[in-house]
Amino acid sequence: MKAILTYERGTIKIAGDAHIPLAKFDSRSGCYRALAYTYRDITEYLERAGVEVEDRVLNPIPCPYLDADIELRPYQQQAVEAWMLSRRGCVVLPTGSGKTHVALHIIQRLSLPTLVVVPTLDLVDQWADRLSVFGVEWVGELSGRRKDIRPITVTTYDSAYANAERLGNRFQLLVFDEVHHLPSEAYSHIAEMSAAPHRLGLTATYEREDERHELLPRLVGGKVFELMPQELAGEHLASYVVERVYLPLTPEEQAEYDAKAKVFKSYIRKRGLTLRSMEDFRRVVMATGYDALAYEALKAWNEARRIAFSSHNKLVKLRELLEMHRRDKIIIFTRHNELVYRISREFLVPAITYKTPKEERHLILNGFREGTYRAVVSSQVLDEGIDVPDASVGIIMSGSGSGREFIQRLGRILRKKEGKEAVLYELVSKDTGEVGISRRRHASKGAS
């Protein structure tokens, strides 16, 4: 028996007389066909079955030996060795613990054409800078601003998705930074349409609320190494404490909150619904398209949440904390832009949101790094994908129930600073749904 393997637009075509359980017969082309990510499994199956193989799948970009001296901490070396056992899988390490160093060592050790996929253009720049240790001449970029394919190419998830079919057989190692983005309905095609046999995922937060992280073992490999912040605190990361501060609403705020929350809860009871998961809540959101009562209920709930998120006493406490930590660098985290701008105006703190131009954002972060500004306030933009200067104090004014978001925010203050303990304050409005939100994020693994 013989099998002839070729690559075609994100798939592997298998011609010949061998039966391939991993592939489906395509009557239009008269051969077996499978998504490209099964390439490694198919070749291993054929080898075990003793089938003669003519392999024309990979057309890798020529890659030199990548010479660089990359020193690793003991736990980083352990992560490398765990991944090398199968050359697939995800390494889960806290923000600031050197996930990039793990990847650099693996890239150097394999010295194979590598595609590094990242969420943002800021991360494209950061990765290109760090990959230059191998020589800038070997590092390319594929994005909306540049189309420069080289042995080591950095790209965004959006650009990798748009070019998945074209690039699917050009690289032998895929590195997915912030790999929790990969299982989305669109981005998963990046992994599926690539024949790259070696795959590395990097993240501080493996799990997703929609549970699509369960696709990662198929797309890139499951967890092969994991450490939580508390396991590195003190030696490699800053020691830290998390303080939850429960604050009452004012009597006027509480009355308005209760009235709004009652509208929402009444709707849930009338419709016989339960809210045990995010999926249950999404059903309520979907119902707003055809149910006027659902629209009014959701509007009331959002107004209730706004009251809890931006209460008067939270702002009083914020002023107290800013005064208490006037010699420290502070990042203030919020859920919505409205509160960002309010804090910025009232406390004269630079604001960063998705609307902030890149140049202005860089000026603010440089000022923060140099000590011109001692605090910045942001709504989710600083959670990941941006190199944030060292801070030792974080203040969560509001957020979601996501453990991932919580760990990302915690990671922003964990870079080790001699003799200084980091502290993350979480301001929670008493007698509101925010108490449950706080409980859910702390229930997530490693979030406390």
Image: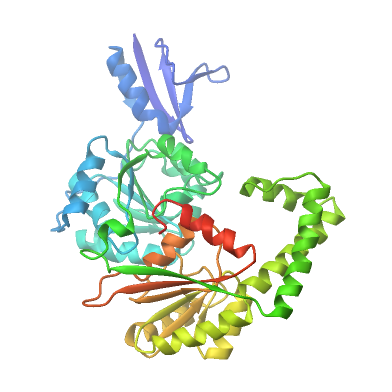
Question: Does residue 420 appear in this view?
Answer: yes
Task: Please state which of residues 52 and 19 is positioned toward the viewer in this rendering.
Answer: 19
At x 50% / y 87%, what residue is drawn?
319
Question: Does residue 150 appear in this view?
Answer: no
At x 49% / y 61%, what residue is drawn?
144
Q: Residue 202's x, y, as percent? A: 35, 51
Q: Residue 90's x, y, as percent? A: 34, 45
Q: Residue 251's x, y, as percent? A: 71, 79
Q: Note whether 373 is above or below 123 in the view shown.
A: below
Q: How many marks?
A: 0
Q: Note whether 91 is above or below 6 in the view shown.
A: below
In which quarter of the view is residue 250 placed?
A: bottom right
**Residue 107 falls left or right of residue 58:** left
Q: Residue furthest right?
A: 292
Q: For the N terminus, give its image quadrant.
A: top left
**Residue 211 falls left or right of residue 238:** right
